[in-house]
Image (spheres, coloured by chain):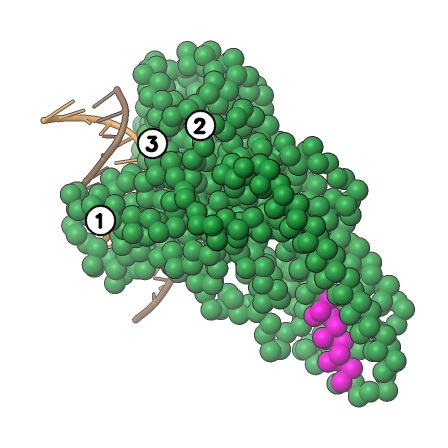
Chain colours: A green, B orange, C brown
Amino acid sequence: MMVESASETIRSAPSGQNGVGSLSGQADGGGGGSSGGGAAGPAAGGAGRDSAVGADSNGEMSPAELLHFQQQQALQVARQFLLQQASGLSSPGNNDSKQSASAVQVPVSVAMMSPQMLTPQQMQQILSPPQLQALLQQQQALMIQQLQEYYKKQQEQLHLQLLTQQQAGKQQPKEALGNKQLAFQQQLLQMQQLQQQHLLNLQRQGLVSLQPSQASGPLQTLPQAVCPTDLPQLWKGEGAPGQPAEDSVKQEGLDLTGTATTATSFAAPPKVSPPLSHHTLPNGQPTVLTPRRDSSSHEEMPGSHPLYGHGECKWPGCETLCEDLGQFIKHLNTEHALDDRSTAQCRVQMQVVQQLEIQLAKESERLQAMMTHLHMRPSEPKPFSQPVTVSAADSFPDGLAHPPTSAAAPVTPLRPPGLGSASLHSGGPARRRSSDKFCSPISSELAQNHEFYKNADVRPPFTYASLIRQAILETPDRQLTLNEIYNWFTRMFAYFRRNTATWKNAVRHNLSLHKCFVRVENVKGAVWTVDEREYQKRRPPKMTGSPTLVKNMISGLSYGALNASYQAALAESSFPLLNSPGMLNPGSASSLLPLGHDDAGAPVEPLPSNGSSSPPRLSPPQYSHQVQVKEEPAEAEEDRRPGPPLGPPNPSTVGPPEDRDLEEELPGEELS
DNA sequence: GGCTGTATAAACATAA
DNA sequence: CTTATGTTTATACAGC
C-alpha cells in the first residue's frame, strides 16, 4: 500500500490525513491511520503530532499568554455582565457555579480539542484566586466601561447620521443619499453584528484568542456554534432568505442552543477541507475552510447590500421585489427614507436584536447549567489540576488533529456525558466496536449529547453503520438519499465537517457493505433505508454477557479518575433503558453493569431535540414493513425476509416479534 | 492465531 | 469529461 503519495494527488483530504494525522492519526494513534504502513504509522503519526502540537498544546503558559487569557476572560465576563445588566438577570452565583463547574469539564473536552487554548476556568485553576480576582475585577471594570462607551458611541454615531441625513433630506441627489443610507445601514448592521458577536463570544466561554476583529469578520468569531464551513450558511441565513437581521440572530441562537440549523443544506465544500488547512489556522481563522466562493458569499460584494437579498428588500416587514441593486437602492430611498417611520423601525430592530441577544444569553446560560449539572460532577477539579497537559496527551495522543479544528470550531465546554470521555479517550474513529454495540442507544446518547457533537470537533463514538441508521431512522420516511445522509452527518457532528472525502467514502462503503442498508429506487432517485432485522442481526452479541467488556470500557474511559457519578452517567447514556433518561444517579452505576443489554429495554429513546425527525418511531414490525415497502433487490431475501408487512418478522431472526416499542434499539436479546 | 466487525483507502463501474 | 453514487477489494486494528 503506501498509497500515500498516490492518494495525495487524488484528494487533499487523504494527503492531509497522512501527513498530519488528523483523522487516522487521532483515531488510534496511528493504528488505523497507519494502515498505509504498519510500522511507519505510529512513528509518522507521532512525529507529526508532536511537532505540530507540541508547540502550542503543552499545559504551561507563558506569562504573556496568561495575561492574554486573563484579558480574554475579562472581556467575556464584561460582556456577560453587560448582558446581564441589560436583561436584569444578574446572577453572580449562577455565574460562579457555572464557571467552577465547567472548570471540571475543561480537562477533557477542552484539552482534547484545543490544547493550545486554556479556558478561563482553567486559568482560574492555574492562578491563585486572589490574583485572578484582582485582575479580573480590574479588567472587568475596564472592559465594561469600554464596552459601554463603545456602544454609546456607536449609538451616537448612528443618531448623528440619522440627523444629518434627515437634514440633507432629499435635496441631495439620490445617489448620494443612497450611499449615505447604505453606509448607515451598514453601520447599523455592523453594530448589530458586533453585539451578536459579543454574545456569541459569551457563549463559547472559555474559548478565546479569536480576534475580536470588527466588521471584517463578525461572525467568524463564532466558533463553536458554527463550524467554519457553516459560516456561509449562516450568512446566507442572514442575507439570503430575505430575512431581517433578527432572523439571522435567531438562527445563530438556534445554533447555539442546539438545534440543527447550520448544515441543513450544508454543501460540504467539495473536498476542500483537508485537515491541513485547519492546522494552518490555529487561531481559528476559518478562512481556509471557506472556499473562495463561500467567503465571497458573505463578504460584501460590490453589488450587494445588507438589506438586499434574493431579489428582495429585507427591510423588516418589507419584501418588495427588486430587480437589481439599483432598483433596490431606489426602493430603499423611497420606501425607507429617513423618516420617523424608518427610524422607529430601526429602533425596533435594534431592540429586537437586543432582546434576542439577551434571550440567547439566557438560553445559553441555561444550557450551560443543564449540561454541567447533568454531565459534570461539581466535585473539585483536583484530578485535573493539570488538565490540559495531561488530558491532551493522554487522551489524544495526536492532539494535533484537534487543536486546529477546535480552534476553528471552538470547543464547547460541554462534554458528552459518559461516553464523551470514552470517545475522547479512544479518540478515534468510531472505531470502538464495543462502543458500537454498547452505544446502540445511539439515539439516546445522541440526543443527550447532540449539542456537544454538533459543536465539538469530536468524533462520535458510534460506528458508521449505527450513525447511518440513526440518520435514516430519524427521518419520517425512514429513508434518505446518500446526500441527505451526508448532510445529516455534517449537521449533527462537527467532526464530519471536515475530511469529507474520507468519511463520505466510509459512508458509502458502509451502505454497500451492510445488508442492513437497503437501497431503494425512488421517484426522485435512490434512497437508502434500514432493514432493522438485518441490523439487529448483525449486531454482535451484546455485551450483556460480557461484563469484562463493560468493565474494560469503563476503565478505559476513565482515564484516571472517573467518579461514580461519571460512571453512572456513562452507563446511563449507554443504557438508557435502565435509567430514566435525564437523571443520572450516581448510585445506579453499579446496577448498570449487570444490566446488560443495551437494548433490553427499550425504547424510549429521547430523540434528538432537533425534532426534525419524528420522535415517534415505529415499532419494529412497522419498520420492517416500511423498509420493505420498497421493492428491493430480492437478493438477500432469505436473510432479511421481508416478512409480512405487519406480521411479526421472522421469529428466528427477530426475536421479539412483539417488539415492544423498542424502536430501534431493540433487542438484541433475541439471539442470545 | 483465527474470527469477526469496523475503519480506511482506493480502484472501478455507472449514471447524470 | 466530471461528478456523484455504488460496489468491491485490500489492509490494519481491536476484541473475543
Between residue A319 and residue A646, name the one nearer to us. A319
Question: Residue under circle 1?
Answer: A44
Mark 3 element type: loop
Badge 1: residue crowd in 10 Å (few <14, some 14–19, many ≥20): many
Badge 2: residue crowd in 10 Å (few <14, some 14–19, many ≥20): some
- Nearer to us of marks 2 and 3 is 2
Mark 2 chain: A
Instruction: Give the answer, above or below, for where A48 lies relative to A519.
Output: below
Labels 3 and 1 share a subunit: yes
Labels 2 and 3 share a subunit: yes
Alpha carbon distance from label 3 to label 1: 23 Å
In percent of the image, x 58 and y 51: which residue is there?
A: A71
Mark 3 chain: A
Question: Residue under circle 3?
Answer: A432
- Nearer to us of marks 3 and 1 is 1
Query: In this picture, which residue range is highlighted in magenta?
Result: A176-188
Residue A391 among magenta residues: no
Q: Is residue A176 in view from this perspective?
A: yes
Alpha carbon distance from label 2 to label 3: 26 Å
Main SS of residues in magenta: helix
Q: Percent from the top left, x then y, of residue A416?
A: 49, 33
Residue type pointed to by label 3: Arg
Q: Percent from the top left, x then y, of residue A451?
A: 55, 39
Alpha carbon distance from label 1 to label 2: 31 Å
